[in-house]
Image: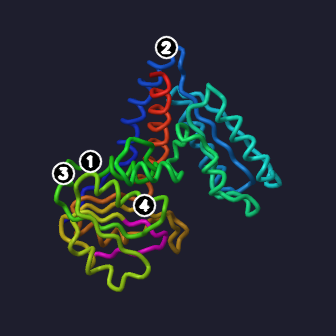
Amino acid sequence: MTAQPIDGTALSTQIRAEVAQRAAALTARGRQPGLAVVLVGDDPASQVYVRNKVKACHDAGVHSVFEKHDATLTEAELLARVAALNADPRIHGILVQMPLPQHINPHKVIEAIATHKDVDGYSVLSAGELMTGLPGFRPCTPYGCMKLIASTGIDLRGKHAVVVGRSNTVGKPMALLLLQANATVTICHSATSDIGHHTRQADVVVVAVGRRNVLRADMVKPGAVVIDVGMNRNDEGKLCGDVDFKSVAQVAGFITPVPGGVGPMTITMLLVNTIEAAERNAG
């Protein structure tokens, strides 16, 4: 068996076209959606991510505000900027790029963002809305993973899904979204004694731990859907995920490549959340 790749780039392009149509409809009503992106410091990876987010907004017809601050910005100054953006009617979503300098408490900053503008879906209230099944903003990467799984045509109802990783940004919300889709969910993590025991029983495996080759071919059920959230570098310096792609692709039914799988979907779902925020604001 050779797995069918799940093309995140193609799916992202399709969803972004739909976002552009929704943005144009709002703009025609005088309600152009707006996203503010705040970057503190000079982290190279963060600068790339932010540049891609701003470009995605421009391409989709979403008004974007980019604020770049020196790493010396104080926590109080950053909180004041968030408060100003909360009060700005042109801004429907606020994203403060992580990581922040060590002298700034990221939790305090995230909680300062108005709930109706928390398009990253990271606040405690957003997490609670996801936990209890209330409508709210879903964290972008797990939200994108759900779209990728849906693109395979597989109905998750009654399927066994295993999430490898328990982070607040991916693992935990991923498990909750799978539960909402009526999958039976197992979460594995660093203290799980035999991860393969669980993944070999899974119809869907989502791996998000940030370490190469965590999932190998002998750990995968034939025909399973494998979603690789990892972003690492191999010995040659090339991008790779958490999954041993070459071997797992010989067993799985569907698999996301790295790059070109989950990555493009994260920014796309940020746009979707921003559009949804603007539509709610517009009534």
Indicate which disc, 2 or 1, sits on the residue closer to the N terminus: 2
**Residue wearing tag 2:** 28
Left/right placement of residue 152 relative to residue 14 reads left
Give the colour scheme of this rendering.
Answer: rainbow
Seen in the picture, residue 3 relative to 57 is either above or below; the reply is below
State the SS at label 4.
Answer: loop
**Residue wearing tag 4:** 229
- Residue 221, position in %: x, y? 20, 71
- Mark on residue 236? none
- The amino acid type found where label 3 is placed reads Asp
State the extent of the magenta-drawn residues as a range: 207-217
Q: Residue 235 or 33: which is nearer the viewer?
A: 33
- Mark on residue 150? 1
- Marks 2 and 1, how far apart at CA: 31 Å
Q: In terms of secondary structure, what is the magenta stretch mainly?
A: loop
CB under 8 Å between discs 4 and 1: no
Indicate which disc, 1 or 3, sits on the residue closer to the N terminus: 1
- Residue 276, position in %: x, y? 44, 33
Question: Neighbour class for label 4 at 10 Å: few (<14), some, many (≥20)?
Answer: many
- Residue 85, position in %: x, y? 67, 35
- Marks 3 and 2, how far apart at CA: 37 Å
**Residue wearing tag 3:** 155
- The amino acid type found where label 1 is placed reads Ala
